[in-house]
Image (cartoon, rainbow, N blue to C red):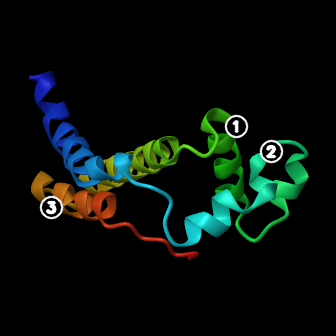
């Protein structure tokens, strides 16, 4: 059945949603204050050169887009973070399932670890 191929990705998505569910009621913490609230550069999308000139241009651009869409409401930033984690987990699941692992269970475990554990290599 074709419907069975969506079961494991659905489980991964639900695991990420469960892990991040309580973050939507949260506030800005730690470096969020400096990087989002106090950083005037991410409070506008134009000129885009100022966003791309920083040490973390992709992060700054995504923060500027989040700010343009929802201002300083943390909900949008958390939703974007969840979407990135889900897409990264599903991408890893697809790669591992197709290339490395014969057993789908191993692909689920490795992908869920990426989705649920918040890794920030640049922070």
Relative side of 78 to 45, left or right: left
Q: Residues within 10 Å of mark 2 (few under 14, many from 20)?
A: some
Q: Residues within 10 Å of mark 1 (few under 14, many from 20)?
A: some
Relative side of 92 to 66, left or right: left
Disc 2 and disc 3: Cα gap in Å?
Answer: 43 Å
Tag 2 near tag 1, CB within 8 Å: yes
Disc 2 and disc 1: Cα gap in Å?
Answer: 7 Å
Q: Position of residue 14 (x, y in %)?
A: 20, 42
Disc 1 and disc 3: Cα gap in Å?
Answer: 40 Å
Relative side of 94 to 101, left or right: right
Tag 2 near tag 3, CB within 8 Å: no
**Which mark is on residue 39?**
none
Q: Residue at x 37, y 46 (%)?
A: 24
Q: Residues within 10 Å of mark 3 (few under 14, many from 20)?
A: some
Mark 3 lies on a secondary structure that is helix
Residue topped by disc 2: 44
Q: Quadrant of the N terminus?
A: top left
Q: Report the front residue among 66 and 12.
A: 66
Q: Residue at x 11, y 30 (%)?
A: 4
Q: Quadrant of the C terminus?
A: bottom right
Residue topped by disc 1: 68
Mark 2 lies on a secondary structure that is loop
Q: Residue at x 24, y 58 (%)?
A: 112
Mark 1 vs mark 3: which is more N-terminal? Answer: 1
Q: Position of residue 80 (x, y in %)?
A: 49, 44
Mark 2 vs mark 1: which is more N-terminal? Answer: 2
Residue topped by disc 3: 106
Residue 45, quarter of picture: top right
């Amino acid at each position: 059945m074709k419907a069975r191929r969506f079961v494991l990705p659905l489980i991964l998505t639900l695991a990420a949603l469960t892990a991040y569910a309580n973050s939507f009621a949260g506030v800005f913490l730690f470096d969020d204050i400096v990087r989002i609230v106090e950083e005037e550069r991410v409070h506008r999308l134009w000129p885009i050169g100022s966003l791309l000139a920083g040490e973390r241009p992709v992060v700054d651009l995504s923060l500027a887009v989040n700010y343009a869409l929802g201002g300083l409401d943390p909900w949008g930033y958390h939703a974007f973070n969840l979407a990135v984690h889900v897409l990264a987990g599903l991408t890893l699941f697809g790669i591992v399932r197709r290339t490395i692992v014969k057993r789908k269970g191993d692909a689920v475990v490795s992908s869920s670890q990426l989705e649920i554990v918040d890794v920030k290599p640049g922070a």
